Amino acid sequence: MNSKEKKSTAYLRGLVTLIVLAALTAGEFWVSSVTNGSLVFLSIIALIKAAIILQYFMHISHLWSEETHS
């Protein structure tokens, strides 16, 4: 995979992450207004968002992968 393909893949992954987080935020708003702020549903959505942020922005999966030196 060349540099241009890597950038394209990174941008697409970032866009998908943005859309998913925005959809989950809209879901939080909907849950808080329709169910009168059900703590269970809001907590589940918050945990999902936290997992996505840890995976994409903080690269938490790299902690458990083998290091490669290029």
Image: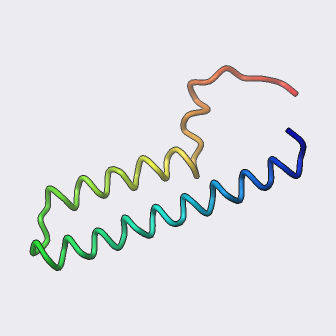
Closest to the observer: 24 or 56? 24
Closest to the observer: 23 or 66? 23
Total labels drawn: 0
Vertical placement of residue 70 versus 24, above or below:
above
Instruction: Name the side, left or right, on which 22 lies relative to 61.
Output: left
- The N terminus appears in which quarter of the rendering? top right
Vertical placement of residue 56 versus 1, above or below:
below
Closest to the observer: 43 or 35? 35
Identify the residue at image location x=54%, y=58%: 17
Pinpoint residue 69: horizontal percent, then vertical percent. Answer: 83, 24
Vertical placement of residue 2 versus 15, above or below:
above
Instruction: Name the side, left or right, on which 32 lies relative to 49.
Output: left
Identify the residue at image location x=22%, y=61%: 42
Identify the residue at image location x=39%, y=55%: 49
How did the renderer colour the structure?
Answer: rainbow
Closest to the observer: 53 or 12? 12
The quadrant in which residue 63 appears is top right
- The C terminus appears in which quarter of the rendering? top right
Identify the residue at image location x=32%, y=50%: 47
Pinpoint residue 2: horizontal percent, then vertical percent. Answer: 90, 42
Extreme top residue here?
66
